[in-house]
Amino acid sequence: MTLFFYNYHEFSIYDYKKIGEPTVRAHDKPLIITHFDNPYISLLSTGRGTRIVRVPRVHDVPGDSCIRFSTVLPGEEPAAIRADEQTDKEHASEAQPFTIDGIYEEHGYGITSHSPLSNIFTDEEFQKVVTEINRLLKAKRNWWMEKLSIFAFGILSFYTQTSVDDYVIQKNREWEEKNIDARIIPPSWNGYLSLDFEILDPMSIAVGSDSKNER
């Protein structure tokens, strides 16, 4: 049986415009799509010029029905698409894991599974944040809390959701104060299908860098 999900977090495309080429054509190496349109713009006061990186749910503990998101920074998973020797040579002068190699539908992507999050957070920073969100979500599934919640008309479940949202708000404020260009979307907004991070559009960052270099 094949399962299809609308909120896939990565896919590949072979027809794209490579950096330095004038038109779209088929390539031997696929472009890996790791960031997506922001569907939350209407719910946010800002959001224009931003993209969404989706962190998938994981089901790696048999019999465990707790909602849990991957704590592995996208691009570092065991099955992630990594750079080969030739790609490493092409990007030898670049310190950032995510680089734009081609354009697809007016957005820039690389040829590895790294997303723009890899240029913002270390593995440890990312893991710490998602682990805390998972911990807060697990509290909601605690058996005694579930039973108490039934008698409390769902108040405890609402409280747990609020505690997750409070943590998200806290982290987003903290990152804003530190000028970190990322924020977490409350997972309740998409029914906990994925943990979404809002980031600046890599193309706008690249254009801004080019403009500075031309001065």
Image: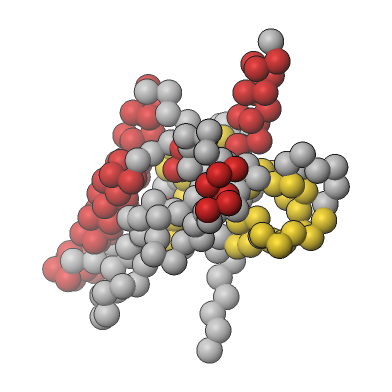
Query: Would you place residue 20 above or below residue 188 in this image?
Result: above
Look at 33% across and 65% down and name the residue there: 67
Q: Is residue 156 left or right of residue 189?
A: left
Name, please, the residue furthest toward the bottom.
Answer: 1
Q: Is residue 87 left or right of residue 58?
A: right
Look at 79% across and 60% down and name the residue there: 26
Q: Position of residue 159 (x, y in %)?
A: 26, 51
Q: Position of residue 33 (x, y in %)?
A: 61, 55
Query: Can residue 27 be seen by looking at this rendering?
Result: yes
Query: Would you place residue 145 above or below residue 37 in this image?
Result: below
Q: Is residue 45 left or right of residue 172?
A: right
Query: Would you place residue 38 above or below residue 47 in this image?
Result: below
Q: How is the image coloured?
A: secondary structure
- The quadrant holding residue 51 is top right
- The quadrant holding residue 145 is bottom left
Q: Position of residue 173 (x, y in %)?
A: 37, 29
Name, please, the residue furthest toward the left.
Answer: 144
The quadrant in which the C terminus is found is top right
Q: Position of residue 97 (x, y in %)?
A: 48, 43
Query: Would you place residue 120 above or below residue 152 in this image?
Result: above
Q: Is residue 110 left or right of residue 53?
A: right
Closer to the camera in the image, 60 or 77 = 77
Closer to the camera in the image, 104 or 192 = 104
